[in-house]
């Protein structure tokens, strides 16, 4: 699948925007799906610099309702300059520490950990994530998955649909960022 995503960074002083966003989501027909804590441990490859190739490899610990699960995620390079549209492969794993040891053994080095509290709201095939990122602040991600073989028009349509949701939420497009949380934290 291709993950189509836009991200608006609000920052440390995002409390008022968060309350307004939650209220708007309800009025727009979005419903709270779940809330969780996520810890993402990012890795660097031994044979190429993911910062230069615009790729990402992480182990995520997702904790929800007292239960935790671990996932390994690979994200390919962004497909355009207007959204975080990229090929994504995610696999649930039984043991995050064993996976970390495997990565280390293969020469992949842990470079940074991103921690966040996330609330996920859904309406049909669109998710809106309200993220409080440790040491960074409040951000809003709007996401939609589309098929790998989606035509250019379908990709553009998905992007426009996400921008429309952003507009309905009353969040300025000037707040959009192409940086990932990892990039934001590393560039501080």
Image (tube, rainbow, N blue to C red):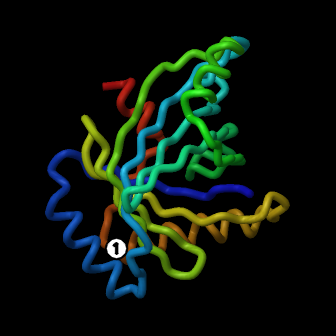
| Residue under pointer 1 | 169
Label count reads 1
Q: Position of residue 3 (x, y in %)?
A: 64, 56
Mark 1, secondary structure of its residue: loop
Q: Quadrant of the C terminus?
A: top left
Position of residue 49 in the picture relative to residue 182 (left or right):
right
Q: Is residue 91 above or below residue 58?
A: below
Q: Quadrant of the N terminus?
A: bottom right
Q: Quadrant of residue 75?
A: top right
Q: Quadrant of residue 148?
A: bottom right
Q: Is residue 46 above or below residue 73?
A: above
Residue at (62% x, 42% y) in the render: 94
Q: Is residue 181 above or below residue 107?
A: below
Residue at (34% x, 73% y) in the render: 169
Q: Is residue 47 above or below residue 144?
A: above
Position of residue 127 in the picture relative to residue 8 (left or right):
right
Q: Mark 1 packing: few (<14 Cα in 10 Å), some, or many (20+)?
A: some
Position of residue 108 in the picture relative to residue 138 (left or right):
right
């Amino acid at each position: 699948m291709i993950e189509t995503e836009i991200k608006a960074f609000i920052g440390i002083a995002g409390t008022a925007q968060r309350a307004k966003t939650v209220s708007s989501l309800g009025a727009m027909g979005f419903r709270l799906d779940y809330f969780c804590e996520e810890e993402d441990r990012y890795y660097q490859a031994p044979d190429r610099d993911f910062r230069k190739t615009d790729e990402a490899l992480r182990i995520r610990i997702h904790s929800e309702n007292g239960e935790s699960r671990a996932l390994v995620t690979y994200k390919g390079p962004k497909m355009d300059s207007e959204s975080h549209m990229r090929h994504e492969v995610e696999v649930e794993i039984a043991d995050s520490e064993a996976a970390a040891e495997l990565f280390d053994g293969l020469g992949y080095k842990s470079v940074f950990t991103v921690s966040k509290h996330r609330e996920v709201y859904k309406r049909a095939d669109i998710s809106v994530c309200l993220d409080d990122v440790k040491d960074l602040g409040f951000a809003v991600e709007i996401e939609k998955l589309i098929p790998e073989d989606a035509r250019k028009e379908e990709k553009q349509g998905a992007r426009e649909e996400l921008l429309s949701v952003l507009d309905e939420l009353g969040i300025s497009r000037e707040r959009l960022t192409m940086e990932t949380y990892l990039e934001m934290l590393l560039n501080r």
